[in-house]
Amino acid sequence: MKKRTGKGYIINTAVIAVIIVAFAFIKSAFGGNEQFRLIIVPSLWQCCYLIILAASLNLILGFLGQLSLGHCGFMAIGAYAAALISLAFQRAGVFTEKAGPAFVLVLIGCILAAGILAALVGLLVGIPALRLKGDYLAIITLGFGMIIVNIINNIPFAGQEGLSLGSASASLYKNGLGFGTASKVTYLWVALIVTLICLTMMFMFIRSKYGRAIKAIRDDEIAASASGINTSYYKIFTFTFSAFFAGIAGALYACANATLSTSSFAFTNGGILNSTFIVVMVVLGGMGSLTGSVVSAIVMFFVNYQIKNGLWVKSLPGFLGGIFAYPMLVYAIILIAVIMFRPRGIFGTYEFSLLNFVRDIKEHRAKKALQKAGNKEAKSND
Amino acid sequence: MTESKKPVLETRNLGITFGGLKAVQDFNIQIFEGELVGLIGPNGAGKTTVFNMLTGVYLPTVGSVILNGEVLNGKKPHQVVSSGVARTFQNIRLFKQMSVIDNVKAAITKDIKYGMVDAMFRTPKFWKVEHELTEKAMDLLSIFKLEGKADQLAANLPYGQQRKLEITRALATDMRLLLLDEPAAGMNPTETAELLECINAIRDRFGISILLIEHDMSLVMNICERIQVIDYGLTIASGLPEEIAKDPKVIAAYLGE
Amino acid sequence: MSTFIQTLIVGLRLGSIYALVALGYTMVYGIIRLINFAHGDFIMVGGYTMIFTIPLALAMGLPAWTSVVFAILCCALVGMTTELVAYRPIRKKGTSMTALITAIAVSMLLENLAQAIPAIGPNPVVASQIFSTGGFSIAGVTMEWTTVSTIVISAVVMVVLYQFTQKTKLGRAMRCVSEDKEASILMGINVNRTIVLTFAIGSGLSAVAALMYMAQYPKVYTTMGMMLGLKAFVAAVLGGIGIIPGAMLGGLIIGLVESFTTSYVSSSMADTFVFLILIIVLIIKPAGILGKNVGEKV
């Protein structure tokens, strides 16, 4: 068993190293390429924060088994915290250009601070909210999400108009940590490494006593407490932990977007970023599978991108094209279909592991064959 | 033999009311170390309610629960567990989407001495503790010969083994007093006999006390040292099995007047 | 002082609209334990039905408000379809969480489907005058006819509905199903039919709410039901979900809180206060003001 663990570390480290090298190579080769700079890099930034968001909500939804509808509220806190802190540092003269070690330090500090602040608010929200369960928890988190956004709206220096107005009085694009096209390419490594670290942390969380405890709570809360698990502690802890990552995703969002506006963090809206959409991603990927969340975040981003920018959409005939003009309509249909025909999501609770990949495929095939044989038998018996 | 010892569990005038309905009244019981006591009564007599009060699920309206001299009233279920009382449920409550071994490991909460930092960085301490947990869990699973099923989902176990897994999970909490809520429900006579055998074996191996709920009187007659009978929330008899079998009040409660 | 009374009246009017919508939530929740997120969007369906049928009613020589009959029929139909197509299959095999997610999905579907229909589109439509304008004033406080009729209609509807659940056979069946589904089946109640009819009635009520909403704010748009529905749901939870008088009480409280916050604090903080009150009530008394706490059976 110990040997396998060691082997797993070696394989994973090797693969990550290969990816980083390959990535550095691609960057140096295509860095000047227009398409790479204008489409692929911004897409990667978006994918990064969507992945973190989906995976972190999955901790609550899939592993703890509680429905939270206010996840974007924590993201908003992260985004505004990172933006405002970076602006403050710039005003204080710590950095003037988006380059140099001072800026990188501020950037990393901002990302961390965003996570910590979101986690603190998550703790404050979680303590009262998690006394409730099921539908009530859903509605109370929705309420908290709205209140958070509403309060940010009414803070004079954050403001309804986003950070382009108000006393911060300048867009992030010019100041603070908002990245333009060139900086997005330069600092892409930050987004990727932050995402990688976040995912690793979440995997480690799931595969420890914490993961066992919250899965037990998901399956049967009463039995969990009768087995000595301090259910409220673990629930609040997980909620806070998840809010931490939502805050980090918010910081990445602030980096990737020139301006912030509170309407981006609502419960639902026309765009891709809202609490409902994150729920869609998690359910689609599989409640209880971080792998599923990662894959589904990328897939949903791609689908959304295609719907918005794909040429094939424009060539669709009349009404069908009309449907695609409202991406949320497509997601609603996908969501209902997934819940009806594959209620556990695409990946169920399966977790991808490089070490066990071959074995998993073999097992899956064997299972399928067994099922087929069983079906045949049932038919011949009829 | 039991008279010289102090009771492990003692209740004093325990009672609970639900909106005017007195579900259980004046419940007094003493369980000594290593004893196997049966709590019997017709359906709806309030047996499970007693369990719920003992384990902190319900807060008793009056009276007190004392475990080894420590008052348990007002403690949360998980605190009661760490004081040394574990239970099973009438309608099996397993962690269905977890593996059999994880069901047991989740309940071993006392020995886990690592925190977030150890979990995040996979320190040697983390591996050591996890390794010990696995060993302990496998050891416990072997009591009911479940070790071969360790990696299966709990939901996929057959009914009888689910009951056994639930008892194993309760054992994993390192308790001194085990409360079993109709462990033989839904089992055939052979399975039941085998299970009762195992319960006896567990008591001898771990030196614990057991309180067993059953509504079928004949089951508990053979293995329990003492039996307490309740009906409509009131204790109507308590004593040795042979006394209980002859008690006219018990017979009346079971046959109806 | 007159500001105070004016605010009070506005609050009552708002509250009676919330109460009507909350009734729909409460009835559905009572019977299948599901927050029907799509309920708010039924208001939108009712609103658009009226937009399309008001000319029809006027052509037939009837007053504009009679188009509410069409709206009730249309909403009831949409409500029943939702139950049959989406909720019933999920209820059979899913958990309560998947059911709730389905409800959110249905809400998203209705909102965006409406936008995709060319005749509706994403832009707001201005409704014509529904009730006659004007009003009367007592001691410096103006009462519009719209306000009076809103409060009166919703009071009447609520009393009728309450009597309906207490006295009629179907109403009793509803209460039975919400208490215990299995026992209801044994008593010969057709549970599925009862649920469908509950959806029909609840959705029909949202059409009435749509009428009153449009009488006050003559504008219809596809997401109009979202905030309205959410606040009405808050009202239902506040009063104690599943309880008809609770929905009325909750609706009035939410309406008053909103109107007083708007006129004395700030209109942008109104939603915050509404949700803050919900949070406080849920933490102090999770079952709502009139609700009874029912623990899980162990």
Image (cartoon, grey):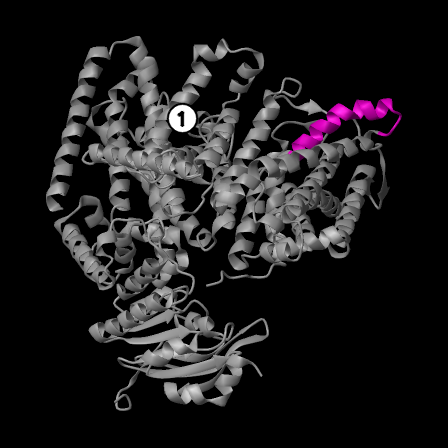
Q: Nearer the viewer, residue A76 or C98?
A: C98
**Quarter the C terminus of chain A occupies:** top left
Task: Give x and y (percent) for residue A187.
Answer: 26, 23
Helix, strand or loop under label 1 = helix
Query: Which residue extends farthest right?
Result: C61
Q: Mark 1 lies on which chain?
A: A
Which residue lies at the image location 43% right of the left edge and 69% below the top edge?
A: B52
Whether residue A303 is visible, yes or no, is yes
Which residue lies at the image location 30% right of the left edge and 55% below the top edge?
A: B103
How many numbered dots are placed on residues in this image? 1
Q: Determine the image quadrant of residue C36.
A: top right
Task: Give x and y (percent) for residue C213.
Answer: 72, 35
Query: Which residue extends farthest front?
Result: A381
Q: Is residue A100 above or below residue B216?
A: above
Query: Which residue extends farthest left?
Result: A3
Q: Give the range drawn in magenta.
A: C42-63
Residue A134 as seen in the image, left or right of residue B93: right
Task: Label the magenta part by its dominant secondary structure.
Answer: helix
Residue B221 as seen in the image, left or right of residue B235: left
Q: Determine the image quadrant of residue C182.
A: bottom right
Q: Is residue B254 above or below residue B128?
A: below
Q: In this view, does A380 lie above or below B69?
A: above
Task: Give x and y (percent) for residue A363.
Answer: 25, 36
Q: Which of A54 and B153 is in front in this view?
A: B153
> Is B217 in the magenta?
no
Q: Is residue A337 above or below residue C115?
A: below
Q: Tell me the residue that label 1 is attached to.
A: A300
Which residue lies at the image location 26% right of the left edge and 87% below the top edge?
A: B5
- Label 1 is placed on what type of residue? Met
Task: Give x and y (percent) for residue A137.
Answer: 48, 49
